[in-house]
Amino acid sequence: MASLNEFLFVSGLLFAVGLAGVIVRRNIIVIFMSLELMLAAASLTLVAFSRYHVTDNGLPDYNGQVFVFFIITVAAAEVAVGLAIIVALYRARQTINVEDLNSMRG
Amino acid sequence: MHSLLFYLFSFLAVAGGILLVAFRNPVSSALSMVLSFVGLAGLFIGLNAYFVGIVQILVYAGAIMVLFIFIIMLLDLNSEEKVKFRSSTVVLGIVIPLCLIFQILGVIQSQDTKKFQPITEETLTAAAESFPEDSAIHKSLAHEKTPQLPDTNLIGRHIFTHYNFPLQVMGALLLVATIGVVVLSKRTAKTRPTNS
């Protein structure tokens, strides 16, 4: 059986891959997807801690899973707003390359 | 969770993540994001978090992926990225995550491993004592033939007892996000004719 540390390492690996995507990529939509990957990696950590911390009655600690539920809700709202902003940005500038988006003038 | 399944699903998750970063075409990136999230959902289900695993599939692999694909189609971005990656950012993008991984490895090695306690039928029937006799949680925990972990009921009980106020805030947040998206798309529709 996989130990808690293995789950934490996989989660850290996913987070690192997402971070690399945010740093390397120039396409703002792919950057956004990498951000989602980082959020999901954090929720893997929470679920692993929830499962390995067994409470007094012998069941997993469900506080962590409730937290993951809230994270998923916020992520869905964040994706909706973020993609709307990207569409508005594309209509204003005709580009989604972050290197071309270097001024905040509307 | 069997170790082999753990390695299979974590390989799927990490490989999907790497493909997400590596693909030039945004549509391929979105599809490999789904691969990664399916692997993650497998890991969640292996950790006895069935509800979170299913929600992960429904929300991430279903709704969010469709939204991404839809926006990519709307903006007509299926052409490959022409700009080459700058070598300085590629070096930074490898070095900074590697630093992170080494720090995590250092923390993990200084930590003693917590033992995995499998959930057996005995633990389920024993846990039934801490819930009211007539509740659905007690019934499925203390079922004579097949005691089951009522994962969704337990999460719902936690949300509606300990996390009632955050749940209300979350509802308000979703409402505000919906209104914000409508306002954002409306304003651009109004200004577009004056721009062109």
Image (tube, rainbow, N blue to C red):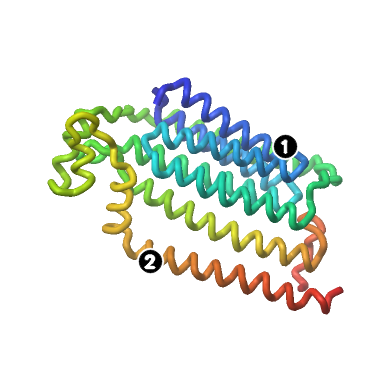
Q: List x then y, in percent, for residue B94.
A: 69, 37
The quarter of the picture where residue A48 lies is top left
Q: Label 1 sits on what residue type?
A: Ala
Q: What chain is tagged by disc 1?
A: B
Q: Is residue B149 left or right of residue B190?
A: left
Q: Nearer the viewer, mark 2 or mark 1?
A: 2
Give SS at disc 1: helix
Give SS at disc 2: helix
Q: Label 2 sits on what residue type?
A: Gln
Q: What chain is tagged by disc 2?
A: B
**Of callouts 2 and 1, the N-terminal one:** 1
Distance Cα–Cα, label 2 vs label 1: 40 Å
Q: Residues within 10 Å of mark 2 (few under 14, many from 20)?
A: few
Dots 2 and 1 on the same chain: yes
Residue designated by label 2 = B168
Q: Residues within 10 Å of mark 1 (few under 14, many from 20)?
A: some
Q: Is residue B36 left or right of residue A59?
A: right
Rendered image: mark on residue B74: none
- Camera-side residue: B60 or A20? B60
Task: Name the residue furthest top.
Answer: B4
Kindly identify the residue that appears in the image at 61 percent across and 71 percent down. B182
Q: List x then y, in percent, for residue A41.
A: 52, 42
Kindly identify the residue that appears in the image at 41 percent across and 31 percent down. B46
Q: Is residue B131 left or right of residue B161?
A: left
The quarter of the picture where residue B189 lies is bottom right
Instruction: Establish if B29 lies above or below A104.
Output: above
Q: List x then y, in percent, for residue B113.
A: 37, 28
Residue designated by label 1 = B22
Kindly identify the residue that appears in the image at 63 percent across and 54 percent down. B67
- Camera-side residue: B166 or B35? B35
- Camera-side residue: A4 or B146? B146
